[in-house]
Image: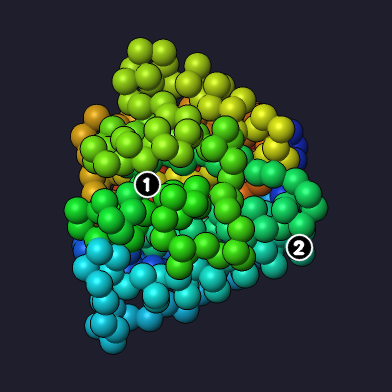
Amino acid sequence: MATSPKTVFNPSITSKKIRVLGVPLDLGQSRRGVDMGPSAVRVAGLEAKLEALGHVVEDGGNVSVPLAETKDPGPHSAKYLSEIAQTCQKHADLVLKALEEGRVPLALGGDHSMAAGTVAGVAEYYRRQNQKIGLLWIDAHSDINTPESSPSGNVHGMPLAALMGLSVPELNIYDFLPKVQADNCVLVGVRDIDQTEKENIRKAGIHVFTMRDIDERGMRAVMEEALRLAGRNTVGYHVSLDMDWVDPEDAPGVGTPVWGGATYREAHLAMEIIADHGRMTSFEIVEVNPVLDERNQTAELAVELALSAFGKKIL
């Protein structure tokens, strides 16, 4: 059970109207359990703790997702692609509606294939106003495989390729590409990239800061430059946070952990810098897997990081 929030209302935080959207999608990867991620994050007290900061929060519930056991996975090169595309379309519509109603979408996953819907919804909303968005992809992986290059056929490794228009036309929600201009798309903290993904990154022309960059330059310098790139000539940027970006020591409950990730404080610093800049249009947390977690530790950290992204400060 989540503890009562200890955060005290901070008058320095600009109050936002936030709509929480759950996407219990687990069709994009082979390790089950990530469909329970939205529930785990809710149980960790997300809504109450955001409200304690001074935000107005409403829960939009979960988008419906078919059970893997009831569907044929289809081609091995992109398993459950049709079902994932349908889920992403429904999710994108909910994201778009939230923005139209003046709410900040906060999406809870679910595997990272859901980002094809989240980013599409945000990009479409601003496209209708002749504006562009940037994208911060904070992840241990680049997720820019295609059905032709993927060694596993797991679609959670393909959403960025779909968003950039490299492949996966089934995930082209709202029928425009790219969803984000390459010059405004920034990967932060990657450390596990397939050889073909390296080629796709170069082909796409997006910006990448690996964990080595963070090691050498420090989190602050990397985040400041990443936000400058994502925010250049845009209305702001969507933040897509995969919890496997954090080192498994602090975030064990993820499906594809990779050692050598961001530390607890580095992760908070990154979110705090995002909040300081004040240009985040929307936020999503993905790949929380309670089945693999320890006492809901990863979900609780996900809530903490969301709080930092939405303005919580130490003092």
SS for callout 2 = helix
> Which one is in front, 105 or 18?
105
- The residue that appears at 27% across and 41% down in the rendered structure is 196
Decide: few, some or many residues near mark 2? Use Cα within 10 Å; few <14, some 14-19, many ≥20. few
Quadrant including the N terminus: bottom left
Q: Is residue 119 above or below residue 248?
A: below
| In the displayed structure image, the side of residue 118 where residue 1 appears, left or right | left
Q: What residue type is labelled 2?
A: Glu
Check residue 144 in the rendering and tell me which mark sits there, or answer none. Answer: 1
| In the displayed structure image, the side of residue 53 where residue 168 appears, left or right | left
Q: Distance between the residues labelled 2 and 1?
A: 29 Å
Say if residue 8 shows up in the picture: no
Q: Which residue lies furthest to the top in this view?
A: 216
Check residue 125 in the rendering and tell me which mark sits there, or answer none. Answer: none
> Which one is in front, 230 or 33?
230
SS for callout 1 = loop
Q: In this view, does 193 lie above or below 74?
A: above
| In the displayed structure image, the side of residue 30 where residue 147 appears, left or right | right
- The residue that appears at 47% across and 75% down in the rendered structure is 86
Q: Do the residues labelled 2 and 1 touch (CB within 8 Å)?
A: no
Circle 2 residue: 100
Label 2 vs label 1, nearer the camera? 1
Q: Which amino acid does label 1 sit on?
A: Ile
- The residue that appears at 55% across and 58% down in the rendered structure is 118
Q: Where is residue 169 in the image (x, y as percent from the top left)?
A: 46, 63
> Which one is in front, 230 or 293?
230
| Quarter assignment of residue 53 | top right
Q: Position of residue 168 (x, y in %)?
A: 41, 60
Q: Position of residue 72 (x, y in %)?
A: 26, 82
- First reached walking from the N terminus: tag 2 or tag 1: 2
Q: Position of residue 162 (x, y in %)?
A: 45, 55
Decide: few, some or many residues near mark 1? Use Cα within 10 Å; few <14, some 14-19, many ≥20. many
